[in-house]
Image (cartoon, grey):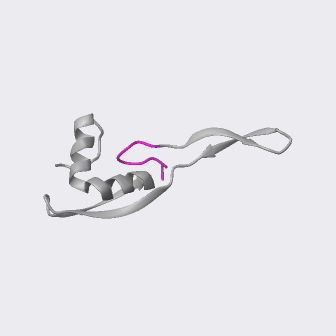
Amino acid sequence: MSKVCQLTGKRPISGNNVSHSNMRTRRRFEPNLQKKRFFIPELDKWVTLKIAASTLKTINKVGIYEYLKKCERKGFKTGIKL
């Protein structure tokens, strides 16, 4: 299962763990992904998305249908037919 947000495309990035003695070792910063079901009343259907928590906050603020339309205008491939 890939760790990529389906709507924003957020994915893991790499960086360093820095110890008290300033030694550096490589690490990964994973996005906070959640699997969530949404009901889209305009389409009258349920969709399941794997999205980042920050994307979920934006969807709660704007609404799922408006957010999907905005993603489609920007050219993101959401996999949902509007």
Residue 38 lies left or right of residue 28; in this view the side is left
Q: Residue 19 location in percent, x, y?
A: 80, 44
Q: Looking at the picture, does residue 58 appear above or below residue 36?
A: above
- Dominant secondary structure (helix, strand or loop) of the stretch shown in magenta: loop
Q: In this view of the protein, which residue sits in the foreground, 71 or 3?
A: 71
From this viewpoint, is residue 40 visible?
yes
Residue drawn at 54 percent across, 43 percent down: 12
Q: Nearer the viewer, residue 1 or 39?
A: 39
Q: Horizontally, is 12 left or right of 40 in the view? A: right
User: How many numbered discs sit on the rendered protein?
Assistant: 0
Where residue 71 appears, as percent x and y from the top left, is: 27, 42
Instruction: Give the farthest residue toward the top.
Output: 75
Residue at image coords 35%, 52%: 58
Q: Position of residue 82 (x, y in %)?
A: 16, 49
- Residue 5 coordinates in the image, percent (x, y): 42, 48
Q: Is residue 9 above or below residue 37?
A: above
Q: Nearer the viewer, residue 15 or 6?
A: 15
The residue furthest front is 61
The residue lying at 82 percent from left, 38 percent from top is 22
* Residue shown at 44% from the left, 56% from the top: 53
Asked if residue 55 is among those painted magenta in the image, a careful observer would answer no
Q: Left or right: where does residue 6 sit relative to residue 19?
A: left
Chain part drawn in magenta: 1-10
Q: For this view, does 80 lie left or right of residue 50?
A: left
Membership of 8 in magenta stretch: yes
- Whether residue 80 is visible here, answered yes or no, is no
